């Protein structure tokens, strides 16, 4: 919690872009600290201060700080040029003002530049609505502390950390489950690259592949519901009642990119043969006879053949092994004809890799 060195008020963390946009050049040149705060005390001349106690008063800004002024004109909305006096004039004539609604609508269109124009570095709607209540005779006073923010980008060291939105959790979950759904193919290959045993890995993830794919589809469907169908319930004047169209476009783009990656991972077993350079190719058979040929059941993609071949090659007495996914078959050459591993050893090795050997 950082306090103003003059008033003792707890400051609001500022973005650097606000200071760079609004400070006079001769003062900006001397700003060294990266963490500056806005003093919300209306009677304090300090506008910005840092943790070391350095401060910048109203005279250092290019604009008047409306919430700290007592003489007209007092700027109220910097993006759309409204003042306290204009709002008070509306109330005097009609009992209310359309200024808050006008600002809200323009914010919906993404026309605001709060961080660059407002000395508070945030949307003015909170201050505007408080000023309207004050002008109508309410005891509420213009405040900078808790008003809604159409910029939707406020943080300070006293604020709780932002929780990830449901949309991001849904997209992240869909990606994770899609990655896991294809782990039966890519994970054994990764393990082989690092010299680790991939025995049983493919079979384990293949068993849960339908579940992972189902969860991924449900999560993606939920994501599209959040982005394209669901309308959030917002309190009038709240931050979510003023959606940022640029953020909405970004959310849609992220969702479609995530969908593309989900499809890439979910369909990986279908094109892994192309990646490995073995897809749609006939097995290369030589005239040299094999010592043992047998059927293999349970392989689901070319990666399964690569994994099983690695495991069979490790068997004592096996000189070379070939596994053909398209044929569902394995062929072994022994170091010495007729002196290969026992049939039970071969069957066990295939089973540990996650498949079933059917020996003649």
Image (tube, rainbow, N blue to C red):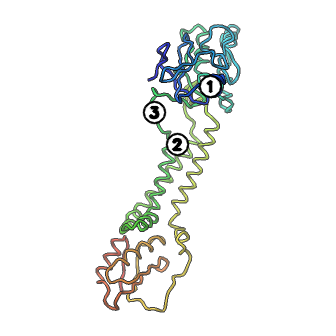
Q: Would you identify the image quadrant in which residue 25 lies?
A: top right
Secondary element at tag 3: loop
From the viewer's perspective, is 307 left or right of 268? left
Disc on the earlier residue, 1 or 3: 1
Callout in the foreground (2, 3): 3
Secondary element at tag 2: helix
Callout in the foreground (1, 2): 1
Mark 1, residue position: 28
Q: From the viewer's side, name the closer residue of 223 and 292.
A: 292
Report, in whole angstroms, how far the alpha carbon at label 2 lies from the one at label 3.
17 Å
Q: From the viewer's side, name the closer residue of 50 and 128.
A: 50
Spot occupied by residue 166 in the image (x, y as percentages of width and height): 49, 41
Mark 2, residue position: 167
> Which residue is pictured at 57% across the width and 48% down the height?
255
Q: Would you identify the image quadrant in which residue 328 lies?
A: bottom left
Spot occupied by residue 144 in the image (x, y as percentages of width and height): 55, 19
Q: Are marks 2 and 3 in contact (CB under 8 Å)?
A: no
10 Å crowding of disc 2: few (<14), some (14-19), many (20+): many
Disc on the earlier residue, 1 or 2: 1
The mark tally for this picture is 3
Mark 3, residue position: 161
């Amino acid at each position: 919690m950082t306090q103003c060195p003059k008033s003792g008020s707890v400051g609001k963390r500022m973005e650097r872009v606000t200071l760079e946009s609004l400070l006079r050049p001769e003062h900006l040149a001397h700003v060294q600290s990266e963490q500056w705060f806005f003093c919300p005390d209306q009677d304090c001349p300090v506008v910005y201060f840092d943790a070391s106690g350095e401060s910048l008063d109203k005279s250092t800004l290019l604009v008047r700080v409306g919430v700290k002024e007592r003489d007209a004109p007092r700027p109220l909305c910097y993006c759309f040029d409204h003042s306290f006096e204009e709002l008070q004039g509306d109330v005097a004539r009609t009992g209310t003002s359309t200024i808050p609604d006008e600002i809200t609508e323009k914010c919906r269109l993404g026309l605001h530049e709060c961080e660059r124009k407002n000395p508070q570095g945030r949307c003015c709607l909170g201050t505007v609505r408080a000023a309207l209540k004050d002008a109508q005779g309410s005891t509420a006073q213009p405040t900078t502390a808790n008003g809604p923010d159409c910029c939707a980008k406020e943080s300070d060291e006293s604020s709780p950390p932002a929780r990830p939105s449901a949309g991001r959790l849904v997209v992240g979950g869909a990606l994770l489950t899609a990655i896991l759904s294809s782990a039966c193919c890519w994970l054994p290959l990764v393990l082989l690259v690092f010299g680790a045993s991939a025995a049983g890995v493919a079979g384990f993830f293949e068993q849960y592949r339908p579940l992972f794919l189902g969860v991924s589809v449900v999560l993606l469907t939920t994501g599209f519901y959040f982005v394209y169908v669901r309308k959030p319930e917002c309190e009038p004047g709240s931050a979510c009642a003023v959606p940022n169209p640029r953020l909405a476009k970004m959310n849609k783009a992220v969702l479609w990119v995530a969908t593309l990656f989900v499809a890439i991972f979910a369909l990986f077993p279908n094109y892994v043969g192309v990646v490995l350079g073995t897809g749609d190719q006939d097995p290369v058979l030589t005239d040299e006879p094999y010592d043992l040929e047998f059927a293999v059941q349970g392989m689901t993609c070319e990666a399964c053949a690569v994994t099983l071949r690695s495991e069979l090659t490790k068997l004592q007495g096996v000189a070379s092994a070939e596994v053909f996914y398209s044929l569902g078959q394995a062929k072994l050459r022994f170091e010495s004809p007729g002196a290969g591993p026992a049939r039970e050893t071969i069957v066990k090795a295939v089973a540990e890799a996650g498949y079933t050997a059917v020996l003649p």
